[in-house]
Image (tube, helix red, strand yellow):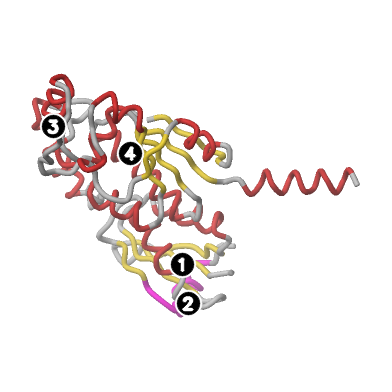
């Protein structure tokens, strides 16, 4: 009886191979790293949850301006100052006032690395779950309409509940 | 189970996947996309130029339950072979 229970316990432990990634950073290189890992894990048949909080949400913004009413002056200022979308992110090192990301993108192309846009598209194609922290959205005054489609909006409990079923959790 | 290079060269692949124009994680994504079209017991050949694939494809096979057979590199790029096991 106890053996049987133990066996079942071992089975449930072994089946938990999901991966969760908290993406806090909004710099180009860190966002690329997170999506490379997410894509790799999905290709290995693991369920992947990415939880976007604070600066990383900028990587999910639509590149075009979206007219939103009801923002405070500070929120408006944030909207203008923060990068609009994956194509406008700075690098965490050697940003050189915006030249760094261009150089890095060129070097990635030369080495046949997928672009960030392609990595994001591939992650979605593979069913990577993307949860955006509603609280961060509220602080920064971002609205769902300003972000790309098919995202979930939730809080820390949603991420934690997925983390319970994961054997790897990253904070980037 | 890895196979000798001579045997690999004789292997008849059910499908050849060309992932030479892509770097990590491209070859693994390509393998994952293509594996569904291969019969169980069939051999998939992955062409790659990213040498990290030499470690990554065996790791992918181990995780996915397929049999990594080995690689040949004398064509100027890598040819990696695996047998689909399920």
> Residue A135: horizontal and vertical position, in percent?
35, 27
Q: Does B38 lie within the magenta span?
A: no
Mark 1 falls within which chain? Answer: B
Query: On the same chain: label 3 and label 2?
Result: no
Q: Residue at x 45, y 69 (%)?
A: B35
Q: Are marks 4 and 3 in contact (CB under 8 Å)?
A: no
Q: Residue at x 30, y 57 (%)?
A: B49
| The C terminus of chain A - image quarter | top left
Q: Nearer the viewer, mark 3 or mark 1?
A: 3
Task: Report the residue marked by disc 1.
Answer: B81
Mark 2, Cα crowd under 10 Å, few <14 / some 14-19 / many 20+, is few
Q: Are marks 3 and 2 in contact (CB under 8 Å)?
A: no
Task: Report the residue marked by disc 3.
Answer: A100
Mark 2 → mark 1, Cα distance in angstroms: 9 Å
* Element under disc 2: loop
* Element under disc 3: helix
Q: Which mark is residue B11?
A: 2
Q: Between disc 4 and disc 3, whose residue precedes? A: 4
Residues drawn in magenta: B4-16
Q: Is residue A35 left or right of residue A69?
A: right
């Amino acid at each position: 009886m106890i053996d049987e229970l133990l066996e079942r316990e071992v089975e449930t432990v072994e089946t938990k191979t999901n991966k969760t990634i908290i993406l806090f950073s909004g710099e180009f290189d860190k966002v690329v790293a997170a999506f490379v890992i997410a894509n790799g894990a999905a290709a290995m048949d693991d369920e992947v949850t990415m939880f976007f909080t604070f600066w990383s949400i900028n990587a999910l913004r639509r590149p075009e301006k979206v007219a939103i009413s009801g923002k405070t002056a500070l929120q408006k200022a944030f909207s203008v100052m923060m990068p609009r979308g994956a194509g406008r992110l700075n690098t965490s090192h050697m940003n050189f006032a915006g030249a760094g990301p261009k150089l890095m993108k060129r070097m990635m192309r030369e080495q046949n690395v997928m672009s960030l846009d392609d990595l994001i598209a591939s992650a979605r194609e593979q069913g990577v779950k993307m949860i955006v922290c509603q609280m961060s959205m509220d602080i920064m005054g971002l609205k769902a309409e300003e972000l790309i489609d098919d995202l979930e909006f939730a809080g820390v409990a949603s991420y934690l509940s997925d983390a319970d079923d994961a054997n790897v959790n990253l904070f980037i | 189970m890895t196979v000798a290079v001579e045997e690999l060269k004789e292997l008849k692949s059910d499908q050849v996947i060309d992932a030479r124009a892509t770097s990590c994680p491209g070859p693994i994504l390509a393998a994952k996309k293509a594996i569904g079209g291969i019969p169980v017991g069939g051999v998939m050949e992955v062409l790659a130029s990213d040498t990290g694939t030499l470690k990554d494809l065996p790791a992918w096979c181990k995780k996915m339950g397929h049999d990594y057979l080995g690689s040949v590199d004398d064509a100027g790029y890598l040819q990696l072979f695996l047998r689909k096991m399920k």
